[in-house]
Image (cartoon, coloured by chain):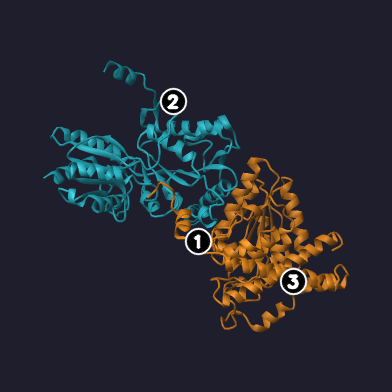
Chain colours: A orange, B cyan
């Protein structure tokens, strides 16, 4: 950890905790039907936080279902507008029509698509646009092990490689695509090896270790900024909750509760907190202060969202039907 | 009269392909954000000369990866560029259906208007050259059923240039269908800058007996039929829709109100096609003006076979149109 400033380590913890607590709060509100849909991040927070903390405000992110809240929080997206969007309110980033398919132009969150794998070609285009505009921005695109089997994964890695585009491909390998074990449908154990076929660097990391992810993505971002092309970062991690909803998928038949418990012991937020306390980077009081502030921020975001109106029919139609076209 | 004849003599003629190239070139000169991307765009087709003029960064050869390079067009469009993505045949766009239908059409909507999508997808289309069932489809009506993307289908060099200029200045995606049989067609294109708005049909021939509503290459088949029918004293009006989305409903309805008879012609399949939509519009808006049942000429929901003589069983022919007009007049 010595190569990371104390201030950055604390920032990583703040974002990890915020992401965790945001998810827990939202889960409760989903159970109460305040909003509709939910892919819990619990257990995978280190991936988006570790990567996005290396990004500048003008860098781009295309997030994916499970970890998008972490990416948006790490990128500095307004919690108020984010929560309002998830609750379908007019004050959300997207007037409440997107929900979890949210984008946030202010912080470079380009938007999330509900179709797995579709984000990768878009990231390639963003990389191409950066190259053609001759800026030193980068784009990070997130996706799971499941969609590494999509043609888009292969097409995109190839295109990013031949054009040396500033794209960071972040593969969250959480061992299951919904109920299907990765080992059943993917021909290799470590997907990062696929990078070799496209002549780009690929690394496989402990996806629950935020420092390792931070360091590896820092290298990838530096390479991208300096015109050296894309990198594939594979983070081996695990979702503690079920695929969607708020349960553990304990009856879904694809995993055991023992397995879940094993991974609970590798909790990326808790382990990092303990490490910071043990190495006296953070005092207990400071940790509690950070956590308190996070709770307050989330509480006020939820309040803002709940008090916001739903969009009008005109507002919704206005976004989809063009003026002058009947 | 003399002036008209002289101006006709002085008209500048361009092929359909040259007109498209000129529209692209003008916008590429004016706006550095415009670039072209697709398979073989450097050495084949109308963009070869643009590659020679603008170089590798503006005319980009892609791998055979339709889904990814079309999705990449979207990515570039939402981050400050104005890409023109090229598919030499509409059959190939099916690999890119997700990038077009799920992504490009919806990105502005689901980001609440934060990101605009100035993306033009040029698509070669149509049969009449005997290339078989995977190279001869007409999929414009398929894309008509998807909200969020304009569907453009010019029939003349003049229209092609003016419509493409409009497409290149928009903030939302458009599919620009170019019929393979039109690329070498010559027509007058003024040197002076002009644009043609979307949703404005053009009366290619005025007439009082029958309204033929059609689009793209079929406009020429209709005009040929109309010419033959003059000898039989049948006066056909030919409406060229020019854009299917947005659709100029008013011009369709006005024409039918005048003639009382409607025939639609399209190269795409009959079921759920352009003609079906036009017919519905007429029935909704001018039912009581119809003197006869409307008639649709289209691909009869069949595969397009190999070889041009076999194609004639399936794709609309001038004789079919002449026959249908005679029938509707009776």
Do the residues at pointers 3 and 2 share their chain?
no
Among the 4 quarters of the image, the one containing residue B301: bottom left
Q: Is residue A234 visible?
A: no
Q: CA distance from mark 2 to mark 1?
A: 45 Å
Question: Looking at the picture, does residue B38 appear above or below residue A149?
Answer: above
Mark 1 surroundings within 10 Å by alpha-carbon count, few (fewer than 14), some (14 through 19), many (20 or more): some
Q: Is residue B228 visible?
A: yes
Residue occupying the far left of the picture: B330
Give the chain letter at badge 2.
B
Give the chain letter at badge 1.
A
* Residue matched to label 3: A268
Q: Position of residue A60 (x, y in %)?
A: 65, 52
Disc number lying in front (3 or 2): 2
* Residue matched to label 1: A311
Residue depicted at 40% across the width and 46% down the height = A324
* Residue matched to label 2: B192
Report if the CB atoms under discs 3 and 1 are less than 8 Å apart: no
Among the 4 quarters of the image, the one containing residue B58: top right
């Amino acid at each position: 950890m010595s190569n990371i400033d104390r201030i950055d380590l604390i920032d990583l913890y703040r974002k990890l905790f915020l992401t965790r607590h945001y998810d827990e709060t939202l889960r409760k509100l989903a159970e109460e039907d305040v909003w509709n849909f939910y892919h819990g991040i619990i257990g995978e927070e280190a991936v988006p936080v570790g990567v996005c903390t290396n990004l500048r405000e003008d860098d781009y992110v295309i997030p994916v279902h499970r970890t998008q809240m972490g990416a948006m929080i790490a990128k500095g997206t307004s919690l108020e507008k984010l929560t309002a969007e998830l609750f379908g309110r007019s004050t959300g980033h997207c007037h409440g029509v997107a929900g979890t398919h949210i984008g946030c132009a202010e912080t470079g969150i380009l938007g999330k698509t509900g179709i797995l794998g579709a984000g990768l070609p878009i990231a390639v285009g963003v990389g191409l646009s950066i190259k053609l505009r001759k800026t030193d921005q980068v784009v990070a695109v997130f996706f799971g092990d499941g969609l590494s089997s999509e043609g888009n994964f292969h097409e995109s890695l190839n295109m990013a490689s031949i054009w040396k585009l500033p794209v960071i491909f972040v593969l969250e390998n959480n061992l299951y695509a919904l109920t299907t074990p990765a080992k059943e449908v993917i021909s290799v154990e470590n997907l990062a090896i696929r990078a070799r076929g496209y002549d780009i660097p690929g690394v496989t990391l402990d996806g629950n270790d935020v420092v390792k992810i931070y360091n590896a993505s820092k290298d990838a971002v530096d390479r991208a900024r300096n015109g050296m092309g894309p990198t594939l970062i594979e983070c081996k991690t695990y979702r503690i909750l079920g695929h969607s909803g708020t349960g553990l998928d304990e009856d879904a038949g694809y995993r055991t509760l023992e397995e879940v418990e094993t991974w609970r012991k590798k909790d990326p937020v808790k382990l990092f907190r303990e490490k910071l306390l043990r190495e006296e980077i953070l005092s207990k009081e400071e940790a509690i202060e950070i956590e308190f502030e996070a709770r307050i921020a989330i509480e006020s975001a939820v309040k803002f969202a709940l008090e916001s109106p739903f969009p009008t029919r005109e507002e919704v139609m206005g976004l989809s039907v063009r003026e002058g076209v009947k | 009269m003399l002036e008209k004849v002289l101006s006709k003599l002085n008209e500048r003629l361009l092929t359909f392909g040259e007109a498209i190239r000129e529209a692209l070139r003008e916008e590429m000169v004016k706006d550095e954000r415009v670039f072209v991307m697709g398979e073989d765009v450097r050495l084949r087709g109308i963009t070869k000369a643009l590659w020679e003029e603008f170089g590798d960064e503006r005319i980009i050869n892609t791998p055979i990866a339709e889904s990814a390079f079309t999705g990449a067009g979207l990515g570039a469009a939402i981050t400050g560029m104005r890409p023109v993505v090229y598919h030499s045949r509409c059959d190939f766009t099916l690999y890119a259906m997700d990038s077009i239908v799920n992504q490009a059409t919806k990105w502005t909507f689901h980001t609440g208007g934060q990101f605009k999508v100035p993306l033009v997808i040029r698509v070669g289309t149509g049969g009449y050259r005997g290339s078989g069932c995977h190279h001869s489809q007409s999929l414009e009506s398929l894309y008509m059923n998807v909200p969020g993307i304009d569907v453009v289908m010019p029939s003349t060099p003049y229209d092609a240039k003016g419509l493409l200029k409009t497409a290149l200045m928009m903030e939302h995606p458009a599919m620009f269908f170019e019929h393979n049989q039109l690329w070498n067609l010559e027509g007058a294109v003024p040197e002076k800058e002009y644009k043609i708005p979307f949703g404005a049909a053009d009366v290619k021939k005025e007439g009082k007996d029958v309204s033929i509503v059609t689009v793209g290459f079929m406009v020429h088949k209709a005009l040929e039929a109309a010419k033959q029918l003059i000898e039989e004293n049948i006066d056909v009006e030919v409406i060229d829709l020019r854009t299917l989305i947005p659709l100029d409903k008013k011009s369709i309805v006005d024409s039918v109100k005048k003639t009382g008879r409607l025939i639609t012609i399209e190269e795409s399949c009959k079921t759920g096609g352009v003609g079906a939509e036009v017919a519905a519009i007429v029935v909704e808006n001018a039912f009581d003006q119809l003197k006869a049942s409307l008639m649709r000429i289209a691909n009869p929901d069949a595969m397009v076979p190999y070889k041009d003589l076999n194609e004639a069983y399936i794709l609309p022919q001038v004789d079919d149109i002449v026959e249908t007009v005679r029938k509707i007049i009776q």
